[in-house]
Image (cartoon, rainbow, N blue to C red):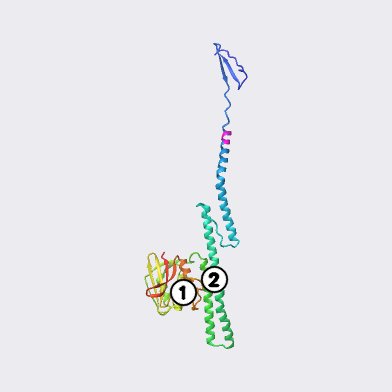
Amino acid sequence: MSNTSVGWLRGEGPPAWSFRLPDRRWIVARAPTRIPNPISGAVVFLLTMAVAIAVFAYPVVRGLTKRIERLQEGVETLGAGNLATRVAIGGCDEVARLAASFNRAAARIEELVGAHRLLLANASHELRTPLSRLRLGIELYGKAPNAEAKAELERDVAELDDLIEEILLASRLDIAGAPPAMEHVDLLALVAEECAHYDDCALEGTPISLTGDPRLLRRLVRNLLENAQRHGKPPVRVALRRDGANAVLSVIDAGHGVPPAQREQVFLPFFQLAGDRKGTGLGLSLVRQIARLHGGEAVAASRPDAASCFIITIPIR
């Protein structure tokens, strides 16, 4: 290519360069059109996506925050003393599980507080009787001391001591979620030791070992035997057998038993059958509490050969 000349063509658009070839033809080279910046396009795209996501996500996020706000209101209401507070459970996500946990905790708190209120009210009533007898006995003994009055005072003090011990134990069992001391227990040997303290008490059964609190299990057996001695009639029969994965303890006496309509009520604290004023009314309540604390149950029933029967079922583990 020979001499070339460069010049502006027409003065329009981006600058161009012209080259004249030897055969007097011209070749025009124009600068390329400006290409948009790719970074600016990416920013615009991202901003558009962010706005779209925000628009679609707002109802979901707002619904979630409303549920959390309701849960917060429930916690504050419960803390203010309204133990009947519950929150609505919606969905199956983490917030719903949290609301369900809150409702279970609130129900447990309400149950515990209600049980303690009932226990306190009944205890304050039941304590008046032995305290009144003690006061009267002390006055009589001061005027005319004698062995009979002294023995009566000792019995009243022992009754008061037993009542206070059972009230404290019932209160502790209400709070406890599990037996305080889990050990390997030979249940048949434990029952045999307790039966040996009572006359007209026969035991039959098979050896069963389980894991539990030996002190509480001993108290369970003792309360059942005391109940049979006080409110039933001899002879007392005790049977221990295995039923699948459970140990079944039956305490049977020759009494009239519990009327079917009151077989649940006898396990309420301080409940006593009509005309029966023996004991404190906490023995069977403690029996059911101890059985349930070990994952079992206590029921009053009847058998073809006996009207009075209490059955305790405890899992073997």
Left or right: 43, with 289 as reference point: right
Left or right: 264, with 125 as reference point: left
Crowd rating for badge 1 (residues with CA inside 10 Å; few <14, some 14–19, many 20+): some
Q: Kindly state the secondary structure of the residue where label 2 is placed.
A: helix
> Which amino acid type is marked by label 2?
Leu
Label annotation for residue 119: 2
Q: Kindly state the secondary structure of the residue where label 1 is placed.
A: helix
Residue 83 or 201: which is nearer the viewer? 83
Distance between the alpha carbons at the discs numbered 2 and 1:
18 Å
SS majority, magenta: helix
The answer to whether 58 is drawn above or below residue 228 in the figure is above
Q: Residue furthest right?
A: 11
Crowd rating for badge 2 (residues with CA inside 10 Å; few <14, some 14–19, many 20+): many
Residue 212 or 30: which is nearer the viewer? 30
Position in image of residue 148 (x %, y %): 52, 86
Q: Give the residue at mark 1.
A: 223
Position in image of residue 221 (x %, y %): 44, 73
Check whether the beta carbons of the residues at disc 2 and disc 1 lie within 8 A of each other.
no
Q: Nearer the viewer, mark 2 or mark 1?
A: 2
Give the residues in magenta. 40-44
First reached walking from the N terminus: tag 2 or tag 1: 2
Residue found 55% across the figure and 68% down from its top: 116
Q: Residue furthest top?
A: 23
- Magenta-colored stretch includes residue 209: no
